[in-house]
Every structure is written in C-alpha cells, then in structure tokens.
Image: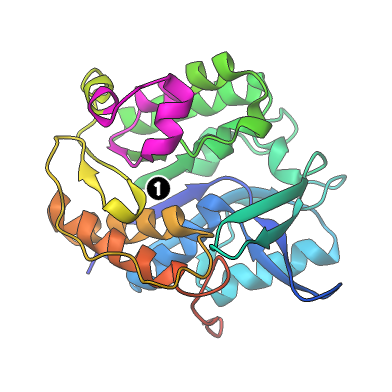
Amino acid sequence: MAKSYLRFGCLGEVMLELALGVGTSAELGVAGDTYNTAVYLAHEQPNLSVEYITGLGSDGFSQRIRKHMMQFRIGTDRTFVSPTRHPGLYAIETDQNGERGFTYWRTASAARCLGDPDMPAISKLLKGLTHLYFSGISLAILAQDNRDRLFAAIADFRSEGGIVAFDSNFRPNLWGDVDLARYETERAWSCCDIAMPSIDDEMVLFDDATESEVLRRFERYDISKGTLKRGKRGPIGLDGVIAKTRVLPKAVIDTTAAGDSFNAAYLAALLDGQNNVEAMIAGHALACRVVAKKGAIIFKKESPS
C-alpha cells in the first residue's frame, strides 16, 4: 500500500455526463479524464489521500458533483467556487464496437477559471501535495495566461520535491491550433517525472510515423519513469521494455475511461513500490475490466466517512 503521508492531487475538469440510452432516455453521471483517474486511484489505494483541484459553481449540479467526490473519497478542499459559473456538460454515444462519440457544453465551466487573478492561486492549491497529475485536457481548457501560471506553479512544486505525472490526452477540438497544442504538450513533457502518453495521441500531435519515433522523441525529455499506452496491444515502457499483458476482453462494451483507469492503476502500483513493468501490467488489467462494462466509473460509490 502507498505510504499514508502521501497526498496526491489530480487537476482538471469534472463534468456532468449524459450517457444516452434507448430513444430519448439518458443517465446523468459525473466524469472527466483526470477525475476518472482520481476515482480509480482512490479505489486502488484506499489509504492514499487523493484530492481534486478544479472549479465548481454554487449551483445544485455543483453540489451534486461535490457529493459524488465525497462518495468516492476524493478530497474537495482544493476545489474552489466561482460565483458566476457552473460545471461543464457532455453527452456520450457509444457505437456497436464500444467506441465513443462526444458532444460538449463547457464554455462556461468553472474549471476554466483555474489561475484567474480573482480565484485562489494555483501555487496555494498545490501546497502540501506530494504528487500532482494533470493532462492535455487540463491545459486545453485554460486561457494562455492561466496555463503560464500553472506551469510556473508546477516548477515551484517540483523544486520543493513534488512529483508530477502527465498524460497528453490530445483532443483536437479543444485546442483548435495544433501548433499551440504541440508547444504546450512539450512544455508539460519537459516538466513531468512520470509520463503516460497514448501512442495514437502522440503520433497525431507530433506527426511521428512509427512507435519507434515516438519512443526516440521521449528520450529527449528528462522523464524518470513512463509508459506508452498502445490499446489492445498492451503498454510498452518508454525504455522499450514490453509488458506481458493479457488481451482485451472479446466483448468491448465501452472504451470510456480506458486510459484514465490505466493511469490510475499504473500510478497506484508505482506508489506501492512496484517496478515499471509491474505497474504497466496493473494498468492494463484495470483498463481491461473497465472497457468490459458501460460507463466511465464502474465501481460503486462509497458512503462518506
């Protein structure tokens, strides 16, 4: 088990999720890439303090999200309140192969206020954490000034011994400008200690033609540990070591949160003292369980302690 003194922060946006059903029916849930990782990390490491860094509103849906956090043992002390904004919303459709399609309504999301001068300083929100995890989506929703403030806070966090994990999680529609996305992602890779990229994202974003090109590019970043997610082929370490993993289940129901859950189990294993190969095997195993069920979060809620 991870040491009880560790305090792990996940930074990003937690949203309302509409999972479309038959006809006009839909089920309302709570999800988001780094939030999903926070939930799975708290499940994999029950004695680990996991906290979420984001913005919410003062509306009823924001309260619903806070309750969801507490039910999954996610700390809310670093979640600030915007008096004029509310949570983002997205609808998800899943095809017969389990692949997802998304429609978003997030322009007024309170999470976009992270770093605003009238909101809590990012450095204050990171204070006291031992680890930080964020993603390309965390960066994409922020204005440039706020991204700069986030990177400055991360530099200070690392200088004080904090450990940073990152997943590029490239979403073209959020960025618009591919060159900007590439620049900001490189900034993130250059200031992280644990890297968890996906091969498809990296090849699209950086025009790498092969897996070998992706791995060679990562050699120039000062990253101490990492894995390249390759879907059903299983992960490979950034050092080129392949993890022997079982194949995906024959029936892939829903690929939502496959990478998010992988990241959680991978990080949980590293925090538990396991080596990189063991961590990759753990990540792949949890992702296999997640894609065999519907929804971003497959575990039941817990009662707040």
Q: Residue at x 74, y 74 (%)?
A: 21
Q: Is residue 135 left or right of residue 287?
A: right
In the picture shown, does residue 240 fall above or below 109? above
The spot of residue 148 in percent (x, y) is 56, 20
In the picture shown, does residue 187 fall above or below 3? above
Q: Is residue 5 visible?
A: no
**For the view shown, which residue lies furthest in the bottom direction?**
303
Q: Residue at x 31, y 38 (%)?
A: 195
In the rendered structure, which amino acid carries the disc numbered 1? Leu
Q: Is residue 74 left or right of residue 131?
A: right
Magenta-colored span: 185-214
Q: Residue at x 69, y 43 (%)?
A: 111
Q: Which residue is mark 1?
A: 129
The spot of residue 100 in percent (x, y) is 61, 55
Q: Residue at x 59, y 65 (%)?
A: 96
Quadrant hosting residue 113: top right
Q: Is residue 52 left or right of residue 55?
A: left
